[in-house]
Image (cartoon, rainbow, N blue to C red):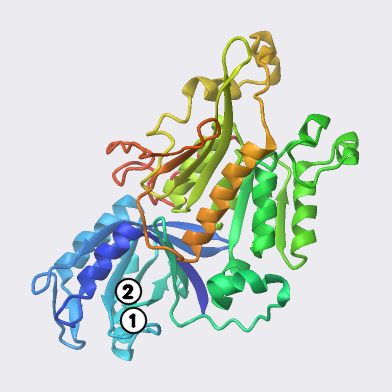
């Protein structure tokens, strides 16, 4: 059977989980409405709405099975799914732990009811989920009559969990290369890194360091995006770049790819020497498990912010800044680590996307020259400041992706070089933000809305 994937925020998952697993030890029900997108023609579901079925009212004793959703509850939500172009998913729980599947009674119920639901849904899939305490399975019915089961569900908060129908049986061997870090997070953690798909956008001073760290950790799948080439001024801070790279104007992506393969020859690499905001390039990011944004353009920030909230992908924006007075004296240096999670850390809410700079970046080179935009001096950059941001960002990925610490509050981190202080900044959250709020146009919509891309 074909596979599908599902993503859900930790807030929504915990609401669902605590409803299903009550102290009575009984079965309970709910309906999820999810956005839809496709990864290599396989469905990706992003949960937008959680509707908990009230026991005895919406979820009652079944005529055939143990419990069932009442027709009125189903009809109200299948028509909402149709009107909002969302996927309808009926949910119930079993008492199992790490291994879960539908019973024969469940399957027969789907076969009786889902053809009619598909007609009401008018072109959208419908399906069901069954949860164990640490497992999940799906039966997704596609409009063409095909069906999909679950490959993996990802629960996304600061801590990132992965649920499968059964424990993953990974027999891949590991050699002595990772022995020291396996002593920290175990062989299961090392194999999880080998399966991880990470994107790095911007392969300059910070991005090249991120690539180096991830490769040596053993991350197995990279999407590398940068449309720039190495110049002489880059050699002081791009890891792996040589004088010959500057002389030959080697693409930064080629240097990063070379760096990865030196550390991990088995890594799978997708290299895109192109502008990340082109639609064809941005589409390659939907399947990533984590995004590192190390590019400094407003358009890249706009796109990644949208990907986080629209496709429920965890990310981090990394940067460093040197502030000087009019005489050139250094007043402050800081490295910024800004995590983004669906519904939290939004760059729009925190005024980190400048509309005037967005407009400037949208102009052609000729237009910028005509309006004297080319007179700005490039920003100062020092590898040691970049390394602080890169190391913090990769360390947070490691801790959160492997579940090495409990879920925590999202803070931006600013590490000040002059004072040596770490400043934790709680991001703003606009309840009416069109980008990150659950009632906004973008949250968990999948391919239901366009990403903020240029053509191509």
The residue where tag 1 is placed is: 111
Q: Nearer the viewer, residue 165 or 252?
A: 252
The residue where tag 2 is placed is: 114
Tell me which corner region of the image, top left, top right, bottom left or bottom right, holds residue 155: bottom left
Q: Residue 405: percent from the left, percent from the top?
A: 42, 63
Tell me which corner region of the image, top left, top right, bottom left or bottom right, holds residue 126: bottom left
Q: Does residue 340 lie above or below 351 as drawn?
A: below
In-image side of 263 versus 431 (left or right): right
Q: Nearer the viewer, residue 280 or 13?
A: 13
Looking at the image, which residue is at 19% across and 60% down?
A: 76
Whole-number angstrom distance, CA of label 1 to CA of label 2 = 6 Å
SS assignment at label 2: helix
| In contact (CB < 8 Å): disc 1 and disc 2 | yes
Looking at the image, which residue is at 55% across and 83% down?
A: 169
Q: Quadrant of the C terminus?
A: top right
In-image side of 116 versus 277 (left or right): left
Mark 2 burial class by Cα count in 10 Å: few <14, some 14-19, many 20+: some
Q: Residue 356: percent from the left, percent from the top?
A: 50, 19
Specify the farthest residue to the front: 419
Q: Does residue 194 lie above or below 33 as drawn?
A: below
Q: Which mark is residue 438?
A: none
Looking at the image, which residue is at 68% across and 78% down?
A: 174
Mark 1 burial class by Cα count in 10 Å: few <14, some 14-19, many 20+: few
Q: Does residue 301 lie above or below 314 as drawn?
A: above
In-image side of 262 versus 146 (left or right): right
Q: What is the tally of numbered marks visible in this picture?
A: 2
Question: Would residue 81 be visible to someone looking at this image?
Answer: yes
SS assignment at label 1: helix
Q: Residue 455: percent from the left, percent from the top?
A: 61, 36
Question: Would residue 286 be visible to someone looking at this image?
Answer: no
Looking at the image, which residue is at 20% across and 80% down?
A: 27
Q: Residue 432: percent from the left, percent from the top?
A: 28, 36
């Amino acid at each position: 059977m074909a596979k599908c994937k599902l993503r859900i925020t930790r807030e929504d998952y915990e609401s669902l989980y605590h409803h299903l697993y009550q102290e009575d030890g009984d079965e309970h029900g709910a309906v999820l409405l999810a956005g839809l997108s496709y990864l290599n023609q396989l469905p990706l579901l992003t949960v937008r709405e959680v509707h908990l079925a009230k026991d005895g009212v919406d979820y009652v004793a079944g005529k055939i099975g143990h419990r069932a959703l009442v027709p009125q509850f189903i009809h109200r939500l299948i028509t909402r799914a149709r009107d909002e172009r969302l996927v309808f998913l009926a949910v119930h729980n079993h008492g199992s732990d790490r291994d879960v599947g539908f019973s024969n009674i469940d399957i027969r119920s789907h076969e009786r009811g889902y053809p009619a639901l598909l007609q009401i849904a008018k072109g959208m899939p419908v399906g069901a989920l069954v949860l164990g305490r640490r497992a999940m399975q799906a039966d997704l019915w596609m409009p063409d009559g095909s069906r999909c089961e679950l490959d993996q569900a990802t629960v996304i908060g600061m801590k990132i969990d992965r649920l499968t129908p059964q424990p993953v049986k990974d027999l891949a061997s590991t050699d002595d290369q990772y022995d020291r870090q396996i002593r920290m997070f175990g062989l299961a953690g090392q194999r999880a890194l080998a399966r991880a798909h990470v994107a790095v956008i911007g392969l300059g001073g910070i991005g090249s360091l991120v690539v180096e760290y991830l490769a040596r950790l053993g991350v197995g799948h990279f999407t590398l995006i940068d449309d720039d080439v190495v110049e002489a001024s880059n050699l002081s801070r791009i890891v792996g770049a040589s004088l010959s790279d500057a002389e030959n104007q080697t693409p930064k992506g080629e240097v990063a790819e070379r760096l990865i393969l030196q550390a991990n020859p088995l890594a799978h690499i997708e290299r895109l020497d192109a502008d990340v905001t082109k639609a064809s390039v941005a589409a390659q990011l939907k399947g990533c498990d984590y995004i590192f944004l190390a590019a400094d353009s407003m358009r890249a920030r706009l796109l990644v912010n949208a990907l986080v909230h629209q496709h429920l992908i965890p990310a981090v924006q990394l940067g460093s800044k040197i502030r000087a007075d009019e005489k050139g004296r250094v007043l402050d240096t800081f490295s910024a680590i800004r995590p983004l999670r669906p519904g939290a850390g939004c760059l729009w809410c925190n005024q980190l996307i400048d509309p005037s700079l967005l407009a400037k970046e949208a102009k052609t080179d000729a237009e910028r020259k005509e309006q004297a935009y080319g007179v700005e001096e490039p920003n100062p950059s020092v590898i040691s400041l970049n390394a602080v941001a890169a190391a913090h960002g990769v360390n947070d990925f490691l801790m959160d992706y492997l579940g090495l610490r409990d879920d925590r509050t999202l803070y931006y981190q600013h590490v000040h070089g002059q004072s040596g202080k770490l400043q934790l900044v709680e991001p703003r959250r606009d309840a009416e933000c069109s980008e990150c709020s659950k009632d906004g146009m973008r949250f968990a919509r999948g391919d239901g809305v366009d990403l903020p891309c240029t053509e191509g």
